[in-house]
Image (tube, rainbow, N blue to C red):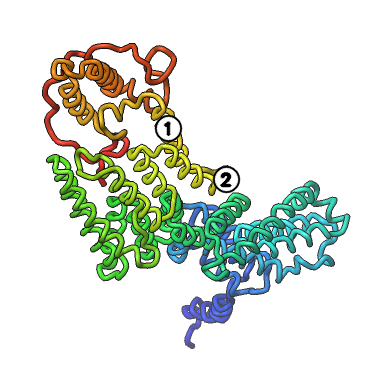
Amino acid sequence: MLSLMPLLPLLNLLLLLPSVFSQSSTPPSASSLRRDADLALASSDYSSALSLYNSALASDPGDPVTYSKRYKFYNRVSRLPKERLPDELKGLSQEELTDLMVSDLSGAIEKGEYLNKGTYQGTKKDKEKASIVEARAELLSKQVKCSNAIKDYQFLLSLPPASMEILGSARTTWSDSLPRLHKCVDLSNTLTSLVTAVPAKRDDRRIIDLVTQLLELLKSSPQSLVRERVSASFRVGTVDAYYSAIADLGHLIKSFPSELDLLELRGTAYFNIGELSGAQSHFTACLKTDAEHKGCKKEHKALKTVKKKVGRADERGEKGEHKEAVEYLMDVKKVLEERSQLPGKSMPAAVLADLYLIKLVKELSGFKPSEAVALGREMVASHDGPESLVALAEALIADEQHQEAVNVLRAEMNKFGNEVPQMLKEAMQKAEVALKQSKEKDYYKILGVARGAAKSEIKKAYKKMALQWHPDKNADNAEKAEKMFMDIAEAYEILGDDEMRAKYDRGEDVTGNGQQGGGGRHGFPGGFPGGFPGGGQHFRQGGQQFHF
């Protein structure tokens, strides 16, 4: 008879197979998946944790606990550097991660009926439910959805007394949040009405102010608000506004690095204020990613033309060929004027300010102060802003229209109320000093040089004037010549010394007798000057070299 003993192990295995297959076909529960996700998160295995939380929700879409767990996961990873995020989250911005968090909080609130007062029984679970509602309210406020945030807080404040006792001091926090959120609603409504107004009635400076108030109020930077401020800054079109746009665009580029239009915009903002190096780096980065990007390509071409002409102007300035240098800059102006006809491509005020200020140096460039005034007024007409007014004021001072310079600047300053740009304050100080000195003794006028003249120009003018008014050469007019000779010596002693000149420019007493323009200084300091420093002079504005 055949023995079955050798077959017993095989038979036992066959008997076990149904139970094995039965166990393997049973999917893990949502709670076990959630538990595994918690363990993965605790060990910083973020990819596995996210995958397991997603699987837990797929297993039981109605479980509010899993929604709240995944919200906490998103909240934790939102503070990580990009390289440590799971692959599926690396391409998301901070605001997109916030959207995910709000979505999961809403899922937990809906599935758990956390907005149903009947589910609050005065137990410790009330605290957990309320914390979920509170977390959503906070995130909604950061998304500028302040009306919805108010509803969440108002619900929490309406909970039964038994629940409030469990929640403790949270009630005070919720109450304190409401005034801020109501102000947010008012500001948002005003902003919306301004943004949607017809262009003729749109107040872009007010838009910038409202956005700034909202960002400070919410202590966050929603990209929708930041983008709105960038648009308004471009429409305002002043140097200060463009610097604001540059800062905002820097934050946006970090959040949306693949959005090349942001690189184009930031490069354009730099271009619009004459910061050509900054513009070049942004257009180059844009074209490196997409060589056919239409906007970056066009701006880069215009930039190359401007840089070439500015470079040639600089070379001419080095050689002392100032008339030719200014002609190159007039070509720059033409290119920029053509560009300024396009939306968002205003004329760089910084470049124009330098251009017109160069014309003030009439001994070098061949332009008269009166012509500089005319050109300055032309610039103000085409580009109304503080930079243009400062340039016009400089021209008026050079043309000895000191009171008019003060009047022009005061009118511009009145537009800004209590927030006057620093450049206007500094220009007004210079204009007031010039007005005061015009009524006393003007050392610049005595030497016949512009207020922004280089030290070598002052020395050259001093030598020329001293030769012209030397008493030995003016025997028939000795008394006047002697007075002029002494004034010239005094003027050079002040303007030829950097420290004394700075004091004089600030309106301080430099004569030692308590009043500006008095006598008391005699003789030529250091003897009569001979020779000049080698090399040409760059174009200057206020002692600064005209470079880009």
Tag 1's secondary structure? helix
Q: Tell me which amino acid carries mark 2.
A: Gly
Residue type at mark 1 is Leu
Front residue of 424/254: it is 424
Task: For residue 83, say whether it is visible.
Answer: no
Q: Position of residue 187 (x, y in %)?
A: 65, 58
Specify the quadrant of the image occupied by residue 245: bottom left
Residues tagged 1 and 2 counted as in contact (Cβ below 8 A): no
In this picture, residue 424 sits left or right of residue 33: left
| Residue wearing tag 1 | 435
- What mark, if any, has residue 543 been given in the picture? none
**Which mark, by number, is residue 417?**
2
The residue that appears at 27% across and 67% down in the rendered structure is 298
> In the displayed structure, would residue 103 be above or below residue 94?
below
Q: SS of the residue at dot 2? A: loop
Nearer-N-terminus badge (1/2): 2
Q: Dividing the picture into quarters, in which one does residue 464 lie?
A: top left
> For residue 433, what is the image quadrant?
top left
Residue ID at (23%, 45%)? 367
Q: Residues within 10 Å of mark 2 (few under 14, many from 20)?
A: few
Q: Position of residue 43 (x, y in %)?
A: 51, 53
Q: CA distance from mark 1 to mark 2?
A: 24 Å
Q: Nearer the viewer, mark 1 or mark 2?
A: 1
Is residue 199 at least partly visible in the picture?
A: yes
Q: Position of residue 437 (x, y in %)?
A: 40, 27
Who is closer to the viewer here, 544 or 77? 544
Towards the viewer: 532 or 153? 532
Would residue 192 appear left or right of 173 to someone viewing this image?
left
